[in-house]
Image (cartoon, rainbow, N blue to C red):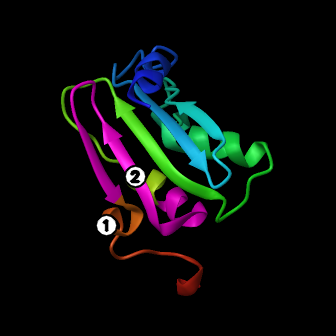
């Protein structure tokens, strides 16, 4: 997975922050969907790699609960976890026990979604 993520980092479009991120989602039927961050001069129009990958899978017919794990790599030397907008999207589509793998080129850490989002806002709050 690490090698696929490293190659995918080249597709990220990050001319403003130079913070490239790549993501691969694995579905319950072991399909892979990729995403990269795509920046915009208007930062609010930027899309993160995690949301890019989720939208890619949804566009191919996958639904809430169809996602098994997510692998995220950034090009820096420090592990970075998903931003809170991305965490909210993960809460919407992944089960709480889904594995979240965070990479740099030299390190990897593993969490469950529940560990990254101990107090969730979801449909139960509505």
- Compared to residue 28, the image places residue 11 above or below, namely above
Q: Determine whether, in the image, residue 37 is placed left or right of residue 104.
A: right
Q: Secondary structure at mark 1?
A: helix
Q: Are marks 1 and 2 in contact (CB under 8 Å)?
A: yes
The percent position of residue 71, horizontal first and vertical second, equals 44, 41
Image point (34%, 25%), residue name:
19
User: Which is nearer the eye, 114 or 3?
Assistant: 3
Q: At x 31% / y 66%, what residue is drawn? A: 115
Q: Is residue 88 above or below residue 49?
A: below
Check disc 1 and report the residue beneath it. Answer: 115
Residue 49 horizontal side relative to residue 78, left or right = right
Q: How many angstroms separate mark 1 from mark 2 (CA)?
A: 9 Å
Q: Which percent across, then down, holds residue 74?
A: 34, 30
Residue 48 appears in the figure: no
Q: Indicate the quadrant where residue 75 lies.
A: top left
Q: Is residue 120 above or below residue 27?
A: below
Q: Which residue is at a point 63% across and 46% down the rendered structure image?
A: 30
Q: In the structure shown, which secondary structural element does the residue marked by tag 2 occupy?
A: strand
Residue 4: % across, % down: 47, 24
In the drawing, what numbered circle is on residue 44? Answer: none
What's drawn in magenta, residue-wise? 88-111
The residue positioned 44% from the left and 26% from the top of the image is 5
Is 110 colored magenta in this rendering? yes
| Residue occupying the far right of the picture | 61
Locate residue 80: give its quadrant: top left
Residue 109 magenta: yes
Disc assigned to residue 100: 2
Q: Nearer the viewer, residue 122 or 56?
A: 56
């Amino acid at each position: 997975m690490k090698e696929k993520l490293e190659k995918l980092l080249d597709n990220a479009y990050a001319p403003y922050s130079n913070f490239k991120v790549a993501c691969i989602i694995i579905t319950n039927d072991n399909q892979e969907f990729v995403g990269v961050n795509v920046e915009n001069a208007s930062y609010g129009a930027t899309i993160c790699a995690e949301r890019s990958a989720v939208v890619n899978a949804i566009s191919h017919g996958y639904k809430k609960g169809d996602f098994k794990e997510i692998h995220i790599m950034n090009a820096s030397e420090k592990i970075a976890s998903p931003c809170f907008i991305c965490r909210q999207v993960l809460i919407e589509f992944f089960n709480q026990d889904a594995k979240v793998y965070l990479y740099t080129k030299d390190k990897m850490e593993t969490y469950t979604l529940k560990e990254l989002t101990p107090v969730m806002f979801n449909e139960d709050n509505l």
